[in-house]
Image (cartoon, grey):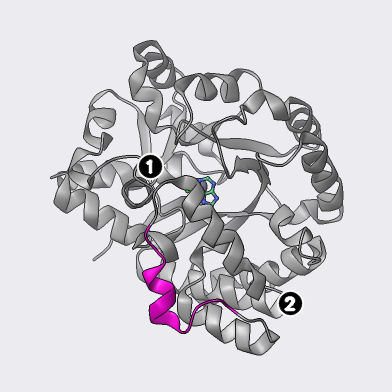
Amino acid sequence: MSLPKAELHLHIEGTLEPELAFELATRNGVELPYADTEALRKAYRFEDLQSFLNLYYELMAVLRTERDFEDLANAYLARAAAQGVRHAEIFFDPQAHLARGVGMGTVVEGLWRALGSSEDNHGVSTQLILCFLRDESADSAMATLEAAKPYLDRIVGIGLDSAEVGHPPVKFREVYEAAAALGLRRVAHAGEEGPPAYITEALDVLGVERIDHGLRCMEDEELVARLVRERIPLTLCPLSNVRLRTVDVLADHPLPAMLDAGLLCTVNSDDPAYFGGYAGDNFDAVGQTLGLSEDRLRELACNSFLASFLEHDEERRAR
Ligand code: ES4
Ligand code: ZN
């Protein structure tokens, strides 16, 4: 039986399985530069974050209509539910779609067709987090926030993703201030490939309440002490870290040391279609390979709800 858990770090575009990619390609008359699903799967060998992102953005070409986004989200929610996910806070990358002529409305309304009925259909509650691409300009991020204004009742918060190194959080100070003024919650990827200083900057300059990944905090003792003291959740993605070579092998993952240090860690899947597993698979992998006890796994599942944006989280966190 898989533990009930919340998924807090999940890019919906990263749930596009090869089979669905080909189905949508056929439906939309889009040519993919791969002969079949097997050839596509063979391309899932990554050197680093950028080599993954190249494929991730390339495959998005098949996502064109509301129905495509609906099908994508429904496929994810069914798989997540089967692995014990009861609540999912789902990232999406509007700039990657706007650049292809697919409008904000198509993306949000399409996703919402699945998310709006997810509690009834899948037993999974959901929230949407709009991510800005950090390798695009701050002006582009601001324009994207503007384009999202008609849909803010469907969006709980904002995040920051894509190529990290060379794109420090401070670049997005104004857009995070504007989002905060709109009542949006704030998170950001930091310390995946980028330095620990990006984690500090995301907290101090962007006012984020969770750090996505945050793995590299372990290089800075003072930062670890601060994250522990302030109970800042980290949304770790162990299988992602292995596939993107942030850690050599899963057995070397710092998760046990991070838990021992008192960090509020959660385990998530990031881009499960590309990295070899959904949320439950990540729990199973760390349980087996890192030798985490049942108690530790329960702690991780409990942390996922504590760190979520579900209501009453402040009360629960204080308990
Ligand atoms: C991502 Cl693993 C990862 N890191 C940064 N940005 C991303 N977008 C989708 N997956
Ligand atoms: Zn991510």
Residue drawn at (43%, 32%), measured in percent from left and top? 214
Q: Quadrant of the C terminus?
A: top left
Residue range (magenta)? 32-45
Expressed as whole percent of the image width and height from the top left, the position of residue 120 reads 55, 74
Q: Is residue 295 left or right of residue 220?
A: left
Residue drawn at (72%, 39%), measured in percent from left and top? 184
Amino acid bearing label 2: Thr
Structural crowding at the residue carrying mark 2, measured as other residues with C-alpha within 10 Å and reported as few (<14), some (14–19) or many (≥20): some
Expressed as whole percent of the image width and height from the top left, the position of residue 180 reads 75, 32
Which residue does the numbered mark 2 point to in the structure image?
A: 65
Q: Earlier in the sequence, mark 1 or mark 2?
A: 2
Q: Is residue 177 left or right of residue 90?
A: right
Indicate whether 221 appears above or below 73.
above
Expressed as whole percent of the image width and height from the top left, the position of residue 168 reads 61, 27
Q: Secondary structure at mark 1?
A: strand
Q: Quadrant of residue 92?
A: bottom right
| Figure label count | 2
Which residue does the numbered mark 1 point to in the structure image?
A: 266
Q: Secondary structure at mark 2?
A: loop
Instruction: Let me know if residue 207 appears in the view.
Output: no
Residue drawn at (62%, 31%), measured in percent from left and top? 167
Indicate whether 196 appears above or below 156.
above
Residue 235 magenta-highlighted: no
Residue drawn at (48%, 52%), measured in percent from left and top? 51
